[in-house]
Image (cartoon, rainbow, N blue to C red):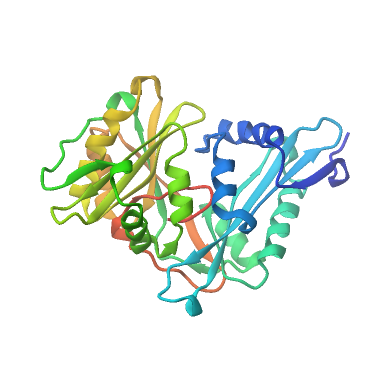
Amino acid sequence: MEKTLDQLEIVTNPSAEQWIDMVQWMAKAEWPLTLEDLTAWKRSFGERFWLFIAIEKETKESVACVMGLSEMTAVDNEENKEYVYIVGLYFVREDWRKHDVGTTLFNKFMEVAGDSNKALLSVLDMSGKYAAKYGFDKMLNYKHDMATIPIEHIVIPKGDPEYIIKDLKHVDEKKLAAYDSSVNRLNRADYLLNFITTINCYTKVALNESGDVVGYCCIRSVLMNYLSISPLYADNEAVARTLLAEVLPMVHHMKIYRHLKAMYPAANEQARSLFDALGGGQTKFENMGQCVFTKKILPIVEGKVFSICETLKGYV
């Protein structure tokens, strides 16, 4: 029987069962997700979070989804605050592709976002379509690259004694949030702490001798048995290397995982150098994404982004 949209029900803020069904499909595509992510997003963004899932009426199976949220940019005062609407988690099960279900869900979020500035991290072969059809025509002048390192080839680096590495619980949360904001130019303290404290996350923070935060790293164990660096922000390669030297040994039974992944702005050449060394020359690099906006490009400090926070819902 030919598939039609009439066979589907679109739900907003789905049940736990519908989310688990959907996330299992996305995990098969190697998307870096955990079952706990939905709770972290909802706790962080509240009414500024939307998740649309298409459900087959007959089987009750989840077949497609689109997620959206609005993040506040970092500003000096309340009068200047603005929000960017970020769309992500755009997934359609293979048997439902070319039946307009993805477009239907995407349009729902576009209606929510209205005339606001919108952003997404597009796969390369789709960026032209997003520009022509939806107005995502403001593009960064660089791509986002993916580094994939087989676990058996990871070379634990040596840290730099110039930096002090601390557990998250021993660091002032406000200082960490301020550092995060200085790199990504977003005001997302609640999200940051909710995300990097979910289960199976390994996190360390780097300080200089004055006690200032100069970087932090979170490595997550995600579905499909691999590790995702989410994120790694650091003032320079030495800080990033020192963080990895401390975080990687924290991972329980690391040899059971297949590989370690990180996505970073290609403009950060230090990131490529870092991951090449981390993989002992066996790291695979791929051009993976193009960050696009509808109204204006929001700046970030690319040289401090060694791995972005979430490839599925953001650009930094």
Residue 153, quarter of picture: top left
Q: Position of residue 261 (x, y in %)?
A: 39, 38
Q: Horizontally, is 77 left or right of 119 in the view?
A: left
Q: Residue furthest bottom?
A: 79
Q: Position of residue 151 (x, y in %)?
A: 33, 26
Q: Nearer the viewer, residue 177 or 294?
A: 177
Q: Is residue 189 above or below residue 149?
A: below
Q: Nearer the viewer, residue 174 or 36?
A: 174
Q: Horizontally, is 186 left or right of 212 in the view?
A: right
Residue 46, quarter of picture: bottom right
- The residue drawn where x is 13% and y is 53% is 209
- The residue drawn where x is 46% and y is 26% is 225
Q: Nearer the viewer, residue 146 or 176?
A: 176
- The residue drawn where x is 73% and y is 58% is 108
Q: Horizontally, is 312 left or right of 6 in the view?
A: left
- The residue drawn where x is 33% and y is 54% is 176
Q: Position of residue 75 (x, y in %)?
A: 43, 73
Q: Is residue 305 above or below residue 38?
A: below
Q: Residue furthest left?
A: 161
Q: Is residue 142 above or below residue 297?
A: above
Residue 183, quarter of picture: bottom left
